[in-house]
Structures are given as C-alpha cells and as structure tokens.
Image: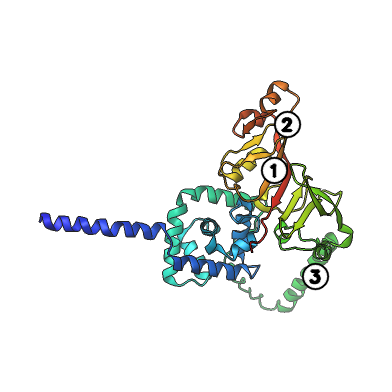
Amino acid sequence: MKLRIKRILILAALILPQALQAQTKLTDALINEFSEKAAERFQLKNDPILVFITDQMSRSGAGGLEVDKTMVELKKDPAALDAALKYLYQYSDCNRQQLIANLRSMNFASNSVFALATYTVNKFKGEAKDLIEEKATLAKTGQIGATPTAPVVQAAPAATAPAAGNTISTGASTAAATTSATATTTAATPAQPAPAEDPYDWDVRNIFPITSQEQLVAKYGQENVVTRDVYDLEGNNLGQGYIIFPDTDNEMELFLDENKGKVITFTRENSKWKSPFGIKVGDPLEKIVKVNGRNFRLNGFEWVNSGMVYSWDGGAMDGKGVSLVFKAFNSGDPKLYDQVTGDKKVKTDQSVLKKLGVTVEKVSFKTTPPQP
C-alpha cells in the first residue's frame, strides 16, 4: 500500500509541472501559428479584431513605435505577442466562450483554439475587470466602436386583413396618410449636405515607412511641407528636416536619416495626429505614468534639459524611442516649485507635481535605423 502511494506521488510530481506548463507557456508551434494568423488578418486592414488589437497595442505602447512592423512579426517579440492575446481577450469582453469564438473566426484549428484560450485566460484573468472597464471607457468616449455582434433579425409585423367592404377605402386612406407623413417629414427636416471628408491621414504610424520628401509631398501636398533645420529635445541641431502643416495646430517636425533613423516631434496642442501610445502635447503627468505602468524620473525644471524624462525606470516606454518634456503650469509658488527645480532628478510620485499641474510640453518619437 505504501509503495502504491509512493508511486502515485512520484507520478503526480512528474505530471503536474507539465500540466501547469501547458497552461502558462505557449509552444513554439502555437507562437508561430498565432503570429502567422495575426499577420495575415492584420494585412487586410479592415479586420475588426486586428484593428482593435493594433489600436490597443499603439495606445499601450506594446507595439513599439513601428506597430505595423510588430504586428507582422509577433513571434519575434514575446511581450508583444502576449499583449496581442491580452487585447484579443479584451475584445472578447474577457469571456472565455467569446474568446474561443473569435479564435475560431481567425481559422485556428480546434486544438490550437483551446490551448490559446486556456493560456490567455489563465495569464490575464487577474486583469479582466480593468480590461472590461477600459474597453467600456474607450467606447463611451468614441475612441472605439462597439464590438461587432450578429445582427438581430426582427420578423415583419403580420398584415391585418381589412374589414369586408372597406378594402379600397382603407388602402386609399393608408396611402394618403403615408404620403402626408412623408411630405410633412420632408418639409420639417430638409436634407443636410454630407460633411466634407478629411483628405489627410492623421495616423503617425503611417509616417514611419516614409523615406523621402517626395513621398511627404505626395501624401500631404507641396503647400503643407517645408524644409527647415530641426532640433532634438535637448536642443541639438539634427540638420535639415521637414515641417508638415507648419504654423498650425497640426504642425509636425520630421527628421529623416537612413543612418540615424527617424525623429518625429510635436510641440502643438489640439493636434489631430493620432500618435503612438496615445500621447499628445497637453497630456497630464498622471496619464503618462499610467501609460508607462510605473513612476519614472524627470530632470529638474529650470536646469539642463528642464522637465525632460531622465529615465522610464523599466516601464512600458523604456527603450521604445519616446522622449517627453514636461512643464509646470502653476509655477508661481516658489515653496512648491523650488522642490522640483535645479540639478536634481524628480520622481513622478511626488505629490508636489500634481499641485504644480505638470503636463506634456513636447513629444518626440525616434526609430532606430535598420541593421545591416
């Protein structure tokens, strides 16, 4: 009896780790399959599942600056692949059965569907509440549309037979009433002209593939592209660059160099541009902390590189090519402002920063050049 129990314990010790691993780790085959299916559907450009995932990858920074490249090479970036699964789970309202249905709609085989669903639910179930709340907020603020659902088909109301002897008069009165109602509606609500379609593409992701002035002019028009010296956020002259929509709220600085990569800089509020990570000029410090996933450090104000991010301290934007400069609106009280000025590094969890109304003043995104 003791020998049998011992054998059972040994067998359990061998099987249990494998079972746990199956729930917490994807096989290379599953990684490759998910990456290939996601890339295939992403390139359709209008697939609602991949549109949602890609937008969330951009908002969170999980896709990096060149999220289009990330989405077709997920197997090369384990963190990005996990993020794609998380946002697929979010798209599925953190519901296992809906997740399975969406995986099937992506044409995964049944054995792959259940393995991916089990992995995803186990890994992200602790975030389910936050993911659902975030999705609801995005929908409420118009940043995403409603998740597509199957249309509800309603049966037409059964026709009511006219009373005997009144067939002609009933039909005539119905037609007259309909005509009258239509005429009244038309008179009361004159047709409105359709709003003019915006001719420009405001997604910053589509700037990254551009490599020449000719491409910029073709995309935004000769009158909206000028050449000037451009500078990085530290004030260093990068050389000749391009200003798109100069002297407007949508002004963007672009530096192109095949050896140094690209640098895109924003300094204007109220811009239409949809930028990586969802960051824009005027964003409060609290939002950037949330995007980074943790507090980070700034250079002290009124000093060298005043208000610039010194270190992301291992957060989501660490090493992603994002540079920000912050400013303090309420800097009139020296007792407060002096706490965060001078030659020092300021941690963003200091309560004084909130009192000072610290917001983003400049945003810069830098890509790395392709490796030979």
Going by the picture, which residue comes out furthest to the right?
Answer: 223
Disc 3 versus disc 1: distance between alpha carbons? 62 Å
N-term mark: 3 or 1: 3
Q: Residues within 10 Å of mark 3 (few under 14, many from 20)?
A: few
Q: Where is residue 326, by image quadrant?
A: top right
N-term mark: 2 or 3: 3
Kind of residue indicated by mark 2: Trp
Kind of residue indicated by mark 3: Thr
Disc 2 versus disc 3: distance between alpha carbons? 75 Å
Q: Where is residue 69, by image quadrant?
A: bottom right
Residue contact at pointers 3 and 1, CB within 8 angstroms: no
The percent coordinates of residue 265 (x first, y second) are 75, 49
Going by the picture, which residue comes out furthest to the left?
Answer: 1
Q: Residues within 10 Å of mark 1 (few under 14, many from 20)?
A: many
Q: Which of the image's four quarters has the C terminus? A: bottom right
Going by the picture, which residue comes out furthest to the front?
Answer: 372
Going by the picture, which residue comes out furthest to the top?
Answer: 335
- Residue beneath label 3, please? 179
Residue contact at pointers 2 and 3, CB within 8 angstroms: no
- Residue beneath label 1, please? 324
On the rendered structure, is 6 left or right of 154? left
The percent coordinates of residue 252 (x first, y second) are 79, 52
The percent coordinates of residue 26 (x first, y second) are 43, 62
Q: Tell me which residue sits at (53%, 47%) in the image.
A: 130
Q: Nearer the viewer, residue 235 or 159?
A: 235
Q: Is residue 263 above or below residue 70?
A: above
Q: Is residue 320 above or below residue 104?
A: above
Q: Where is residue 197, by image quadrant?
A: bottom right
Q: Tell me which residue sits at (11%, 54%) in the image.
A: 2
- Residue beneath label 2, please? 303
On the rendered structure, is 2 left or right of 58? left
